[in-house]
Image (cartoon, rainbow, N blue to C red):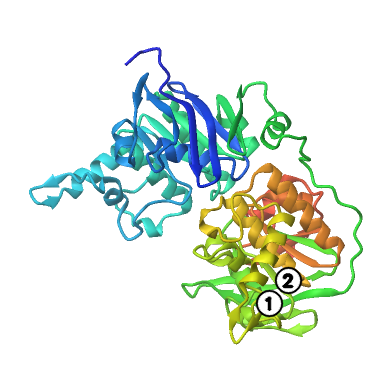
Amino acid sequence: MSGDAPALELRGITKRFGSLVANNAIDFELKRGEIHALLGENGAGKSTLMNVLYGLHQPDEGEMLVDGETVEIHSPRQAMNLGIGMVHQHFMLVPVMSVAENLVLGAEPRNGLLLDYKAAARRTRELSERFGLAVNPDAKVENLSVGTQQRVEILRALFGGAKMLVLDEPTAVLTAQESQDLFRVLRALQEEGTSIVFISHKLNEVLEISDRVTVLRRGEKIDTVVTEGSSERSLARLMVGRDVLLRVEKSEHTVREPLLQVEGVSAEDDRGLPAVRDVSFEVRAGEIVGLAGVDANGQSELIEVLTGLRKPTAGTVRLAGRDVTGASAREVKDAGLGHIAEDRHRRGLVLDFSLAENLFLSEYRRPGNSRFGLMSPRVMAERARGLLKAYDVRGGDTETRAASLSGGNQQKCVIARELSADPQVLIAAQPTRGLDVGAIEFVHRRLVEERDKGRAILLVSLELEEIRSLSDRVLVIYEGAIVAELPPSSSEEDFGMLMTGGGRREEEAA
């Protein structure tokens, strides 16, 4: 082992899946104690490269060096033995177990034949205090917030002795505050000498947290640059291969009749507690109405009521003048509602189905698309080919399983299906969650085009900048109630006050 050698070096790594070249002769270097960002569009090959490093895929060509010595990594266990830990985008925890039990899984400290739980809890506390990862060892994972679950994943990697940490899209499911908490933890790890690979497509985060950035595009390395002196615009150009509009361009809009009318709607969450409280608003043809709020303030339950996935306890919902209160999801869809779901895995796609099947989910009941209950493979494939091309879905063809696409390309499939059904009202819930800058630009442009065609769009997003740049009007939700309507030009401070309950209307406070 050479003291001057990088912690990690990848040389000429190539990985193919059939005819698809996911990584093409990629070089990558991670210095000791640095945070090195791996940046690229969805499907650029970032996760594949790190899965090769972690032993989940075997490279077709190239070599890997750890501390200057050539290694072959055939499994995650081998990677961990070499000091490489990985925190996946979708967590690998056992929900019914405690934090301490998850940490020691596979390497349990024993007292005779039994698990030495006290030793596990003690080691958990020691690690969490050392790195500022405040976690209760006895808490059940299923009861933890997403941000805390991620800390448990990081702790588990450190528990296994990781000196190098790979974080795959770590902020994709975090709130802004949780992301800042994560960055504090990463800096503490860096000060202790841990080397970190930070996979992302969020330019502002890469600029904030990393020392260097390596950019991948369509499976190839484009460049490695020092973060200091780089800008969002320069990184976006490397990522996409062209200048990218970092703002939304909108023309003046013409609003017409109300297409979505919500009056006095209330609903309960899964525990039977009030989640939506007497909500009333309308969305008219030709406008985008944004719903701004901190996560878990009733947005998900409200969306479920509007889309037929949850029964309201009070109030009415009208779609293009038709009362759809309490109607099923199919009835609401037939009435003219499109729904870009906030969780594309649970609600948006059937991951084991092909892309053609997923894109046909709304169409199979229409005349001419099926006979005697059987769908026409030819009709499905023709329709899917057109949509995959029109929406620039990369990484597969009509027969590719949805699960094998990157998150951003999965989202494009959902959007393609929902918009191609020609809805009058579109509910876009977190439509750009997990998307890169080029895909975000594409989705924003499509939403504005749909507005200009006369659709009524309700945009629900945790990204305040997205709400402000896309919306014509903004509703603020706090603890399940609409507390204000603001023009999108209002300041972040005004929004922040209302979103955290600090600026409720005087009549409500009285």
Which residue does the image show at 62% across and 30% down from the upper left? 207
- Residue 289 lies, with reference to residue 12, above or below; the image says below
Looking at the image, residue 487 lies above or below residue 234: below
Answer whether labels 1 and 2 touch (C-beta < 8 Å). Answer: yes
Between 281 and 393, the residue placed more toward the observer is: 393
Residue 390 shows in this picture: yes
Where is mark 2, residue-wise?
Answer: 421
Which residue occupies the extreme bottom position in the image? 372
Tell me if 384 is positioned left or right of 71 in this view.
right
Instruction: Give coordinates of residue 311: x percent, y percent.
Output: 58, 80
x%, y% of residue 105?
A: 26, 49
Q: Residues within 10 Å of mark 2 (few under 14, many from 20)?
A: some
Q: Quadrant of residue 380?
A: bottom right
Residue 294 at x, y = what percent? Answer: 61, 55
Which residue: 38% across, 51% down?
92
Residue located beneath label 1 in the image: 333
